[in-house]
Amino acid sequence: MAPRVPKAQLTGLTGRVIKLMSRKMLGKVAEPVEVAWHNRKVLRTAMSLETKLKKWDAVEESLKSFAHMAVAAQVGCGWCLDFGYFKAQNENLDLAKASQVPRWRESDVFTPLERDVLEYAEAMTNTPPTVTDGLSARLLERLGPGGMVELTGYIAFANLVTRNNAALGIESQGFSDSCEIPLTEVAQRRASSGTASAS
């Protein structure tokens, strides 16, 4: 399925630079960039925010990556989930864990902290949010106030990106095809149907 907003041609010097960098890092141009090119103010703001998020360092990268993948699985953003697997391999994350994020409740590969982070990501993504005092207290104890604020902000950003891509009809580009991580059945169902199950 093509995106609901057609992809734009990346033009000018900036467009050429973005195409060159995307192809070097990913092997192809990311569809969210091609769609957002229609409104470069939106694209620049999103890219700037993402760059700034990479400087956050109060929470382990693996926890944030797993949280983003949990949001993507719940929202049904096939693009984010696909890219998340690709990113997990390139950042040397635990690939067995990454492959199990969409079915983390049934899986036994996650630590108690990872399970709390995944639960928190889903609880924040629910509408309305279903975050409990008990879950927040456990995370606050393990991550500290600064880490808790960072994790919450990161999950909020993941919701922005995943919901944006899902609404625009941007689907998987096959980034994970080069990985050794199979999409789990749950992830495939959610991404292809575009629906999320409430936890």
Image: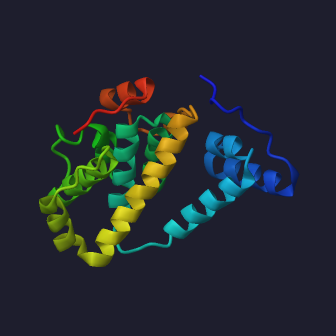
Residue at x-position 34% and y-position 63%: 152
Q: Is residue 127 above or below residue 90?
A: above
Q: Nearer the viewer, residue 119 or 182?
A: 119
Q: Position of residue 178 (x, y in %)?
A: 52, 37
**Quick check: 88 left or right of 18?**
left
Residue at x-position 46% and y-position 37%: 77
Residue at x-position 72% and y-position 35%: 7
The image quadrant that residue 28 belongs to is top right
Q: Position of residue 176 (x, y in %)?
A: 49, 38
Q: Position of residue 122 (x, y in %)?
A: 28, 47
The image quadrant that residue 132 belongs to is bottom left
Residue at x-position 19% and y-position 47%: 109
Quarter of the picture holding the N terminus: top right
Q: Is residue 140 above or below residue 44?
A: below
Q: Nearer the viewer, residue 186 or 5?
A: 5
Residue 155 visible in image: yes
Q: How is the image coloured?
A: rainbow
Q: Nearer the viewer, residue 66 or 124?
A: 124
Q: Position of residue 187 (x, y in %)?
A: 36, 32
**Quick check: 71 left or right of 174?**
left
Outermost residue to the left: 134
The image quadrant that residue 81 belongs to is top left
Q: Is residue 149 above or below residue 169?
A: below
